[in-house]
Image: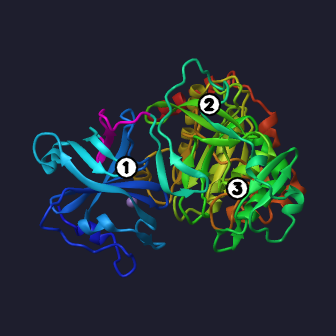
Amino acid sequence: MGLGTYRKMRDFRRTPEPKGAVSKASRRRFVVQEHHASKLHFDFRLEVGGVLKSWSVPRGPSLDPSEKRLAVETEDHPVEYLKFEGLIPEGEYGAGEHMRWDGGTYVALGEGSAAEQLEAGRLDFELKGEKLRGAFTLVRMKRRAGEWLLFKRSDEFAEADWELRLRKPVDGVETIKGKSKKAKGRSEGGGAGRVRQFDAAKKAGGGKVVPVARALKAKAPEGDLNVRVGREVVPLTHLERVYWPEEGYTKGDLIRYYYEVADYILPYLKDRPLIMKRYPTGVGGPSFHQHDVNEAPSFARTVPLEVEDGGAHEVDYVVGDNLATLLYMANLGAVERHPWHSRVADLGHPDWFVFDLDPAEGVTFETICDVALTTRDVLARLGLDSYPKTSGSRGIHVYVPVEPVYDYEQIAELAEQVATAVAREQARVATVERSKRRRGAGMIYVDHMQNARGKSVVAPYSVRPKPGATVSAPLEWREVERRKVRTSDFHIRNMLRRLERKGDLFAPVLRKGQQLEGVFEQARELSARRKKRAT
Ligand code: MN
């Protein structure tokens, strides 16, 4: 135990965190801190042996004994950290607001001292805090370095369905829910779950309602506004908030972009569960994934789905259905649109699959274009048409539209065979190696792993939380052949112009349900033949 790691990770000229020292006394205190870092999480710390043993708990602690929370071991902190609250500056380790959420003292319950129990991989203890009280257990997971589970034990302080309340709500999110229990008799896609539906018009209060077109015509929309979208009212807030500090683009600019391209992007979102990643204070600020929604305006459809997320549980997804929902999500700080590959009516059968060509640092865009063309050619040999778009980040996505009658397992296998063939033909620059470490420098990862149920790739015309407010832009194969385009060429300021000139280049992805009879066999032969040749 010591503070070497803690100190090495920090520049005390810049961070307000205490340098601290190993203390001689151990007073068995604990603290839980709410940390609005790049990902909102909670830090759980126990005073043991003169330092604070620390864990990062992504979903925070719970008083519900059925909620076992992942707790990732982090470096020992000095006891001075018990009282630390403040803003860790941008660029420093753990940048973001740090505040005390709960604290008090603890007593070790099991045999031996707390230090001995932790060493052995399981600590039973009792907390005497303001929010957290009663018996808890921390247990180290086998075969998962540094990962523990933290959970409440049953006693008079236990509380089923307890919800963690944030001290500092992030735009509409005040509580972090536990995993929902599977509702009996509810089938996929059936009925509203535990989502609280609210009437957005009423919530908007007595404020004036402006037609959306007029509201977004303003050069720099600011403040809060209620806009009319068809028959719905969508409340928009903090329109002046800067989301891209470098460019000075605001939340108003983001909402206006989605309004302008709505006719083009909505067909790719319609009837599909959407995964939301929210940046409530802009793209440099904290962000968090929100699959599960607690409440939604009445115009937004939600669907409860069973998902595998370290254990099966049910999650309420927003379904991308209409303009009002599109704008509502933008107002929540959801910069990107991440639709499932399949639709609500038939979630087991995707209607496209995707290759994500993801380059390592330093790979030229020309090389990425080469690998995209090889992907096109391998698919063409199987008789399949494919469609490229920029990822909006650094790579290219290649989409293959299929008739939605094949299941995810079949599709995933086919995608793997194609990706493997592509990597073989471009062996010097492309790989299907999943481990980043083993991939080697300068390689493009031909990622075929996103073709599973519940996975997603950013939609065409989706904005990315990247410098320049880039957009994922469909391309013509001609443009890829010429190797002249760059991902940074397409952004919220010029995408509409390109759309007006070229139309929706991705339209065939929605129209062309390609059949795969025969293709599976050919792909299998292709990989078998290659294997034989290799031996
Ligand atoms: Mn932290």
Left or right: residue 79 versus residue 338 is: left
Give me the C-alpha separation between circle 1 and circle 2: 28 Å
Could you say which is closer to the camera, residue 138 or residue 234? 234
**Which residue position is annotated with label 1?**
131
Please give the name of the residue rendered at 48% of the width and 36% of the height, measured from the top-left corner. 179
Which stretch appears magenta? Answer: 144-160
Neighbour tally class for label 1: few under 14, some 14-19, many 20 plus, Cα within 10 Å: some
The verdict on residue 149 being magenta is: yes
User: Assess mark 1: CB under 8 A from ligand 1?
Assistant: no
Q: Is residue 305 above or below residue 9?
A: above
SS for callout 3 = helix
Neighbour tally class for label 3: few under 14, some 14-19, many 20 plus, Cα within 10 Å: many
Dot 3 or dot 1: first in sequence order is 1
Left or right: residue 115 versus residue 486 is: left
SS for callout 2 = loop
Dot 1 or dot 2: first in sequence order is 1
Give me the C-alpha separation between circle 2 and circle 3: 23 Å
